[in-house]
Amino acid sequence: MKKLFIITTLFLIGAACLLSACGGKSIFGSSNVDSTAMRVQKNKRTALDAEMAMNSHDVIGLFKDCAPDYVEYQSGESKPMNIDSAKAAMKDFFTAFPDVKGDSLIYLGQGDTVVVMGTWSGKFKGAMGPMKPTGKPFKVFDEDIFSFNKDGKITSHRSVQSVNTYISQVSKKAH
């Protein structure tokens, strides 16, 4: 029994020394599990910050963590936008829907992608391009898909829901 205790103790001391010498890295190769998990959590936090900026209609906050080469794809129905065009579009959107908000948001992340699912609602209270406000509400389930670079900056955003879904609910023809 005493020999087993001594062998186990020596093994644990040797393992501790080996890990210390390796700087905490695995002797079986570099393991990025912890760093990948931490990067995913950081990206989820950045996506949360963007969605909270959306809820508070803060255009600057919405784009503060975007990479300089950021691309806004929306739902893919229109031409992709650069960051300046996306900021202008969001200002117009907040004018048209000053009470827009997301509820019941769920954040899922893997690798360099974070998906935020939730229900978005608001009323069409301000002009949007040539469209006059109708005062009608919209309520849609949507998903925002954020892509990140290795520095944790948002490189792109996509929505699953078509802009036409929103417009169909707030147009004069909507029932």
Image: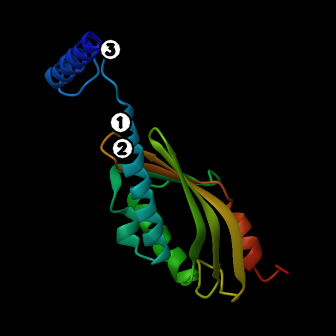
Q: Look at the image and tell me in which quarter the C terminus lies.
A: bottom right
Is disc 1 in contact with disc 3, using a CB cutoff of under 8 Å? Answer: no
- Image height of 33 relative to 83, above or below: above
Is disc 1 in contact with disc 2, using a CB cutoff of under 8 Å? Answer: yes
Residue that mark 1 sits on: 34
Q: Label 3 sits on what residue type?
A: Phe
Coloring scheme used: rainbow
Callout 1: SS: helix
Residue that mark 2 sits on: 38
Q: Earlier in the sequence, mark 1 or mark 3?
A: 3
Residue that mark 3 sits on: 28
Determine crowd level at label 3: few under 14, some 14-19, many 20+ residues with C-alpha closer than 10 A. Answer: few
- Image height of 14 relative to 162, above or below: above
Q: CA distance from mark 3 to mark 2?
A: 21 Å
- Image height of 126 relative to 23, above or below: below
Q: Residue 17: which quarter of the image?
A: top left
Q: Is residue 44 left or right of residue 10?
A: right
Callout 2: SS: helix
Q: Label 2 sits on what residue type?
A: Met
Instruction: Tell me where residue 95 appears, x and y as whole percent.
Output: 52, 82
- Image height of 88 relative to 156, above or below: below
